[in-house]
Image (spheres, grey):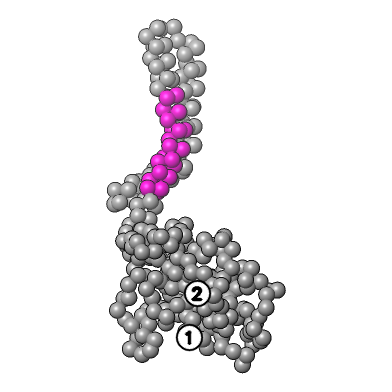
Amino acid sequence: MEYLTDRAAQLEYKISIYKNHRKTIEDKMTKEIEQIQALMWNVQDQQCFEYLFSRVTILEDRLKCVREAEPKLLDDLANVRAIIVQLEWGLEQQAIPPLPSKATMLFSPGDESPRYPYLDSRYCQVDKAEQSRRSFSWGFITRYSADPESRRFRIRHSKAHECPVHEPCDHWRYLDPREWATQEENAVDMQLICMHSKSIAPDKHWIEGMKMYDDEVRDKEGPKYTDRPCYIFDALKPDFSIVEKLGFQVLTWNLVGARWEEVMDQCGRLIQQPL
């Protein structure tokens, strides 16, 4: 790196010299060429003529080099600067610790709260991310997640140790029920409780007074969720479009084997903590 920075400084110095003195050098050489060419018209001696001719050739070659020197120096300087930028970027990347993988969300970091519901930092609330889905209400989820028409699905993220947290990916896939008992190392398995879109359509019969969406629930009409999702939701970024393409809507989800207190809605909000 030191050599490259020194080289860049040298090139900048040479370029400045050419910019300040090139015209003077070119004019001097052009004048000398014209003087020699004028002399050659009257020279009779062959040896003298050959010398003057060779001298003109040398000066013309030098003049060409002078005219081409600055563009070449500028190209060289641009290449050196590009290499320096690339090396500096590489050093910066080495200095930045890599993000933990999504597989780290499988295990508690060991910082559980001493009070109920004894949640660890994976389930702490984070700043609200922009929601792409409308949030179902607490009453609607608790009523219909236990409905006989609800369906359970599982999705899996294989090789989660190779996928950084917080980054959307296309690694999630539908997990066939025949695979549920087959564990896979470094795979994140999620259980989803869903209802078919037709079963929760607006024209279906609702329990009187129940609001389907959280933003429809007014104060004192019932409990509402916090607007902030859990860290684990943003870290894993599950792809619920897998079941949505099958015509289902996600009511709740959780890591396979998780406790009830760790169940979340489709926006990553804990079910058991309504406000």
- Give the x, y percent position of residue 220: 61, 93
- Find disc 1 in the rendering and name its residue: 273
Q: Position of residue 115 (x, y in %)?
A: 36, 90
Q: Is residue 56 visible?
A: yes
Is residue 145 left or right of 107 when viewed as pictured?
A: right
Label 1 packing within 10 angstroms: few (<14), some (14-19), many (20+): some
Residue drawn at x 58%, y 76% as measured from the top left = 135
List x then y, in percent, for residue 58: 40, 22
Seen from the viewer's position, the closer of residues 166 and 98 is 166
- As drawn, 44 above or below 273: above
Q: Which residues are magenta?
A: 59-83
Which callout, 2 or 1, points at the residue further toward the start of the chain? 2
Quadrant in the rendering for residue 246:
bottom right
State which quadrant residue 213 falls in: bottom right
Element class at badge 1: loop
At 29% from the left and 52% from the top, the residue drawn is 2
**Residue lying at 50% horizontally and 17% vertically, measured from the top left:** 38
> Which residue matches tag 2?
252
Q: Please name the residue shown 48% across and 85% down the image.
A: 273
